[in-house]
Amino acid sequence: MTTSSSLLNLFFLLLTFTIKLKFAIAGGTVKDIDGNVLNITSKYSILPSIENHGGVTVAKTEVKNQLLVVLSSSALPVTFTDSNSTKAILTDDIVSVNFTNIPKYNGSSSWIVIYDKSAKVPYVAVGSAKDYPSHQIKTGTFKIESIGALYKFVFCSDIANTSCKDVGVYQENGGIKRLALTGNALLIKFKKDSI
C-alpha cells in the first residue's frame, strides 16, 4: 500500500469518526411523525402538537413583499439547511428554514425575526432586511430542540447559544396567530411532504 493510499484511508476513517462523534455529542436527530430523520433534501410541513389544528404557513401584510409566519388551518411546506456537514437535521444544529412555493411571491423565502414599533413582541417573518426597511431585524439563528417526542424552535441571538428564546404563537385581539418570540414554546411535529 502506498503512502497516498494510506493517507486517503486515514482521511476517510477520521471523517467517519468525526461524523459519528458529531451525532454522539449532539442532542440527536430530528424525526418526522413517521420516525424518519429530517434531512436537507426533503420538504416538510410544520404541524402543531395538537391534532387537527392546521400548520405553519404565511400571511401577507398590507405591504408588498412582507410576509408573516403564522399558524393557520393549513401548512405550507418548508426545507431546511443546517450548519453540519451531514444531510441529517440534528437538534443542536443551527438551521435555516425556507418555505417552498409561496404563491405569487418571488422574494427570499427564509425565516427572519423582525421587531417594529407596533409589534408587542419580536415576530417571525419571511424575506430579507431589504423587505423590511423600517423594521429592526434581529440577528441570530434558529435551532430545533426536542421536548420528549415533540419539538420546538428557538431563536438564539448569540453564537454561544446562551441567549435563546422559544418561538411561540402571539395573537392580538383575536387576529392572526403569528409565530413570535413569546416565551411560551409552540410544540410541533414534522410531516414529510409526499410531493
Image: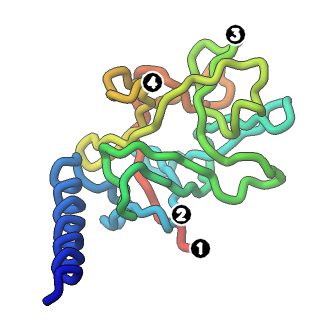
- Residue at horizontal 23 percent and vertical 52 percent from the top: 28
Residue marked by disc 3: 117
Farthest-out residue, front: 3
Marks 3/4: CA–CA distance: 20 Å
Q: Position of residue 101 (x, y in %)?
A: 71, 59
Identify whether 29 is placed above or below 166.
Answer: below
Q: Position of residue 77 (x, y in %)?
A: 59, 57
Q: Amino acid at mark 1?
A: Ile
Q: Position of residue 152 (x, y in %)?
A: 38, 39
Residue marked by disc 4: 157
Side (left or right) of 19 relative to 185: left
Looking at the picture, tell me which residue is in the foreground, 53 or 98: 98
* Badge number at residue 168: none
Q: Amino acid at mark 2?
A: Lys
Q: Which mark is first along the chain, 2 or 4? A: 2
Q: Are marks 1 and 2 in contact (CB under 8 Å)?
A: yes
Secondary structure at badge 4 equals loop
Q: Position of residue 53 (x, y in %)?
A: 52, 46
Residue marked by disc 2: 43
Residue marked by disc 1: 195
